[in-house]
Image: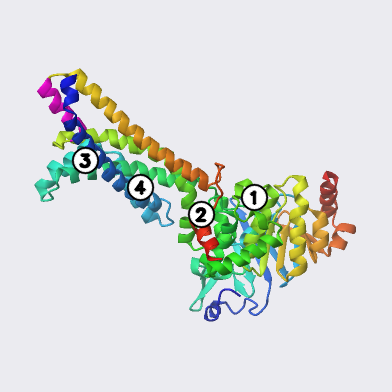
Amino acid sequence: MSDVLSSYPLLLRGAWVTIQLTLYGSALALVMAFVFGLIATARSAWLRALGRIYVEFFRGTATLVLMYWFFYALPLVGARFAPMFAAVLALGLNVGAYGAEVVRGAVKAVPKAQYEATVALNMRPGQRLRRVLLPQAIALMLPPFGNLLIELMKGSAVVSLISIADLMLRAQQLRQSTGQTTAVFLVILVMYFVIAQVLQLFVRYLERRADIMLGRRPGRSARSPLDTRLGAAK
Amino acid sequence: MATTDSAADAVLPEDGAAGTDGIRFDGVVKRFGDNVVLRELDFSVAAGERVTLIGPSGSGKTTILRLLMTLEKVDDGVIWVDGRSLSHMRRGDRLVPADEKYLRRVRSDIGMVFQQFNLFPNMSVLRNVTEAPVHVLGLSKDEAVERARELLELVGLSDKADAHPGALSGGQQQRVAIARALAMRPKILLQDEVTSALDPELVAGVLDVLRDIANETDITMLCVTHEMGFARDVSNRVLMFDQGQIVEEGTPEKIFSEPENQRTQDFLHAVLDQH
């Protein structure tokens, strides 16, 4: 065990790579989720079909297979990706497909009466979405987004298979050099768990903010930055 | 008015009683599936007139308001508002279904208060009232806030400007919703059973606010309500609906005191028995 613990800089470097993969992957997933999730609520049937194709394709393909495609198969037809880039692409596109379903569901779950109020106030379609429907929908998206974020982080362990030195790969190296299989896997089990808890805390914080915005949580007035600015202008 | 429609008015079809202010329903038909909600409905409301729509539930009253707010589309016939069709616009010499841009122009004169208030929970009370004036009418924030504070005072909620809608009672929320609708300076205010979702003790406060507005402005009002006392006080005319058609109309005195139609008599008995 002490061999394993004394090699902690190696594991920390691996953990840092895992965290980077999680950050970049989830950033890409978030963009894809909003783009294709909102497209799926569009009036145009063509746009909706485009959203469906993205979701069905990337939800239905294994992250590992996608990653092999980006890393091994596409270079054969001339598109060469750095390992990290291929990994982020595979993780982001895959989780983004799940996220797009979350976005679509959340926007549809905002009561129709809210939409009708925006029409009665003669808002433009973009304003309806940005000022009323999305802020309420985002509050609904946060819990499932939290799940996806942790899934993405844990799922990133597959990148070790294309030789990215993440936490998993470092653990394998350490296991080979020390022979202490149990100790190594126990340590990285805890490390993955700790990273997941930090992510979970971050999502909880966002959920609390959303609850305050929607007035579900007392203790602060509903003042928004706009109101504060307006107050100061008086 | 807050929006300038000068050149845009050229879009209106000629046979639409152009220049006639107010609302006109011309053979309006509305179906939901096989259910015919409005059957070839004809009626008009003059500018500044206060009209109450009464009748049993399912008689099409709320549908009339929703059609006027462009939340629903007519299946046949035309609705004219100040000489402009709500459903069709002119392109060349053809009438084509209205697009969003055209709808936004015709909607700018119409406001609506909903049964369930429909305040935006992601904004403070004040911002509920300033949001559309700032972003739709293009008012400066200072102007919008000043106007919102006046309106909140009018509805008796000056002290709630920074509160969250969820922290208000139903009656207070409905008064904010009235202020929010008035902030857009509508010429026509649609009121869809605005007190039906309220606890009995909160109804009077909301109705008092609407009475004040009726007395102090010349806004055209269409009210769907079961509050017969309120209908008697504010309306110039009462329309009794049944099965998608007007079965009787007249002054509140006539309709409430000596209704001629059997269905009106039955309906009024049923409503008054509840109270």
* Sequence-earlier tag: 4 or 2: 4
Residue at screen point 37% across, 46% down: A100
Q: Quadrant of the N terminus of chain B?
A: bottom right
Q: Residues within 10 Å of mark 2 (few under 14, many from 20)?
A: some
Residue behind mark 4 = A33
- Region of the chain picked out in magenta, as a range: A166-178
* Mark 3 and mark 1: Cα distance apart in space: 48 Å
* Sequence-earlier tag: 3 or 4: 4
Using the rendered view, name the quadrant where residue B131 is placed: bottom right
Name the amino acid type tagged 4.
Ala
Left or right: residue A231 versus residue A55 is: right
Q: Residues within 10 Å of mark 3 (few under 14, many from 20)?
A: many
Residue behind mark 2 = A224
**Helix, strand or loop under label 3:** helix
Q: Nearer the viewer, residue A51 or A13?
A: A13
* Mark 2 and mark 3: Cα distance apart in space: 43 Å
Marks 2 and 1 close (CB-CB < 8 Å): no
On whether disc 4 and disc 1 are found on a single subunit, the reply is no
Name the amino acid type tagged 1.
Gln
Left or right: residue A141 versus residue B204 is: left
Residue behind mark 3 = A66
* Mark 4 and mark 2: Cα distance apart in space: 26 Å
